[in-house]
Amino acid sequence: MQVPLLDLKTQYAALKHEIMPRLEAVLDSQVLIGGPEVERFEKECAAYCGTKDAIAISSGTDAILCALMAMDVKAGDEVILPSFTFFATAGCVHRLGAKPVFVDIEPETFNMNPEAIEAKITAKTKAVMPVHLFGQMADMDPILDLADKYGIQVLEDACQSLGSTQRGVKAGALGLCGAFSFFPSKNLGGAGDGGLLSTNNPAFADRVRLLRNHGAKQRYFHDEVGANFRLDSLQCAYLSVKLKHLESWHAARRVNAAIYHEILDGCPGIVMPKVLPINTSIHNQFTLRVKDGKRDALLKHLTDNQIGSAIYYPLCLHLQECFAFLGGREGDLPESEKASKEVLSIPIYPELAEAQVRFVGETIRAFF
Ligand SMILES: Cc1ncc(COP(=O)(O)O)c(C=O)c1O
């Protein structure tokens, strides 16, 4: 039995009849940039996230970059963020001339450890960027409290967690803003790159809209330097169709996760992912820890059995070549470094057949 890590074709085949008329309508209208499909999708996203506003952006990376620009993060500023995350979280900070200041993660959730933040706050700290990794939100209350205490802005990197909740509040609704990604492999995957910023702050939303369009309210008259951070109308139409199905896909992901727990809980050699009682996870990834240095051997065992898996992420950001100038060393962030050596993500996408999920679980069990 083959079980790929992801199967985008099956989802597309089921939705093609809904998607095509919407795309055709956009093409017929030739309103390709901005217009009603973008506005509609933004309203749908704001309603879904429970925020006052949502702004469609060209990618998750651009959503982070644009948010940081709208937060006035500039050369010399510092932004506190986890090291165990996708590169964009820190790359965007550096691109603005600011310094990414890395903190360690909590071993149970892989998310930023709030207790590690305060010691890293300096007079230069402009923002903190918790990342809601693998579909589950970082522990936000202590982060928001610290931000309040020190007058720091909070940008949620929710690129992997659209729809996840903490105490009933959706990701992207707690900080000043939340950045989301519609990269095709995400829980809400676009037909290419795409992203979003959610916010409850109308002035911030206005600034983001301005920056998204080269800082111009009126064409060819620029209030400030922005960029082209727009998301195409075709993308918005495509994503709007898919958004209606997102909750049912989350439910299917949870069923798959429950089957993995049924088969693998207590399996020696593995630590199963944990969802905090305050959280719901949308299981964008299902990430095991493989103990005793056996991660790569398990990956090979899965590959030999035609099962896809992936390592998110094999090298922490504080140890990346491009950030060597920041002076990060092995041993600085022990939990992040340990995670990068132990993690393995296995198939969790909603279209998996139960037999496939069971096959993956049994194949892992058989390895130990
Ligand atoms: C945590 C995190 N941040 C940022 C991004 C960047 O999103 P995009 O690939 O849409 O630019 C991603 C997507 O891979 C991500 O997982």
Image: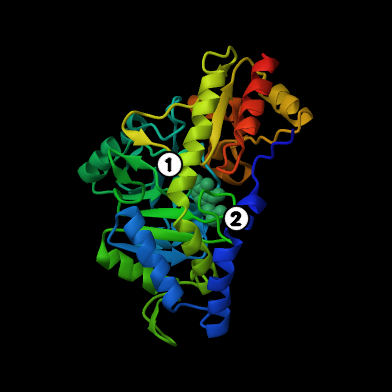
Considering depth in this image, is 279 or 343 the residue closer to the camera?
279
Q: Position of residue 98 (x, y in %)?
A: 44, 53
Report if residue 196 is visible in the image: yes
Where in the figure is residue 284, as x and y percent of width and height?
51, 42
Residue pushed farthest left?
149
- Residue 31 is left or right of residue 276, and the answer is right
Q: Is mark 2 within 8 Å of ligand 1?
A: no
Quadrant into which the N terminus falls: top right
Q: Which residue is mark 2?
A: 14
Left or right of 319 in this view: 120 = left
Cβ of mark 1 under 8 Å from ligand 1: the answer is yes
Q: Amino acid at mark 1?
A: His
In the depicted view, which residue is nearer to us: 339 or 191?
191
- Mark sitting on residue 132: 1
Q: Is residue 11 above or below residue 354?
A: below
Q: Position of residue 232 (x, y in %)?
A: 53, 72
Identify the secondary structure beneath mark 1: loop
Badge 2 or badge 1: first in the primary sequence: 2
Could you classify mark 2 by the number of other residues whose Cα lies within 10 Å: few (under 14), some (14-19), or many (20 or more)?
A: few
Callout 1 environment at 10 Å: few (<14), some (14 to 19), or many (20+)?
many
Q: How much space separates mark 2 and mark 1, taking CA atoms?
A: 29 Å
Residue 71 appearing in the image? no
Q: Amino acid at mark 2?
A: Ala
